[in-house]
Amino acid sequence: MAGMNVNVFVKSYWNYYLELEDQFITTKKFVEFASSNSATYSIEYLKLFQAVCSEIDVVAKILAEEYDAEFKKIKNKNIQKWGYYLQSAYPYLETISVLFNNDYSICPWKNWKYEKYIDKKGALRYRLLQGKETPFWWTAYNKVKHERTSHFKDGKANYSRANQKNLIYALAALFILEMSYLESIKEETEKFYSASKLFRYNK
């Protein structure tokens, strides 16, 4: 992977990640970071959840293009498509876990993998491999984004999915994407890694 200029990456993506992280940290004044608060939701969480997941979509597409220029030619670049290319670039992605707030370990991309296939009409498609699944926090994001006032199984409106747990997992997923890219271009990552106030790799 040739890689864009690291200064461009830092200015365009990494600094924004740190800003999103800082915004989340400010919410701790009102809601403690704790498993007992995992289902707590708010307008502030909703705003941040959508911003973080939107940035995941942006960064994932950039990294897919960096890995394979052919990705630029693909139309309707959804998670199945950029996910396939991301996993080709970073095959270990679904195994990476991070320690959140020096408290507990999470693996945001766990059990997530796609394959290409040809449908009955001869068109190239992408789908989850058998036994794999879309990250639960990404499903929540789409429900919040597209069906906010609809209700799911427990009777709660979808906007309640903009909760602390889903936001933490989404931030962790973005952190892992950006750190994986920096490592792939052989950049000295310690200065970036240590800039995060929330996450450490779970060695």
Image (cartoon, rainbow, N blue to C red):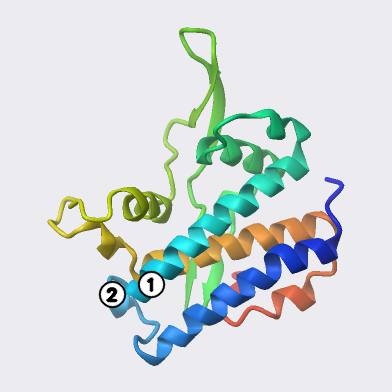
Instruction: Tell me: 176 left or right of 158.
Output: right
Outermost residue toward the top in this view: 121
Q: Which mark is residue 79?
A: none
The residue lying at 69 percent from left, 68 percent from top is 14
Q: Position of residue 128 (x, y in %)?
A: 47, 33
Query: Quick one: SS at disc 1?
Result: helix
The residue sitting at 70% across, 48% down in the picture is 63
Q: Earlier in the sequence, mark 1 or mark 2?
A: 2
Residue 174 in the image: state x and y as whole percent.
58, 61
Q: CA distance from mark 1 to mark 2?
A: 9 Å
Q: Are marks 1 and 2 in contact (CB under 8 Å)?
A: yes
Q: Residue at x 51, y 63 (%)?
A: 52
- Quadrant of the image for the C terminus? bottom right
Q: What secondary structure is marked by label 2?
A: loop
Packing grade of label 1 (10 A; few <14, some 14-19, many >=20) is many
Q: Residues within 10 Å of mark 2 (few under 14, many from 20)?
A: some
Residue to which mark 2 is pinned: 40
Horizontal placement of 149 versus 32: left or right?
A: left
Closest to the observer, 45 or 178: 45
Q: Residue at x 62, y 61 (%)?
A: 176
Closest to the camera, between mark 1 and mark 2, is: 1
Q: Give the position of the N terminus as an image quadrant.
A: top right
When the figure is inspected, residue 166 is found, relative to residue 59, above or below; the finding is below
* Place of residue 199 in the rendered image (x, y in percent of width and height, measured from the top left): 58, 75
Which x, y percent locates residue 145? 37, 53
Q: In the image, is 12 to the left or to the right of 1? A: left
Residue type marked 1: Tyr
Please state if 90 lies on the left or on the right of 95 as rendered. Answer: right
Q: Amino acid at mark 2?
A: Thr
Residue designated by label 1: 45
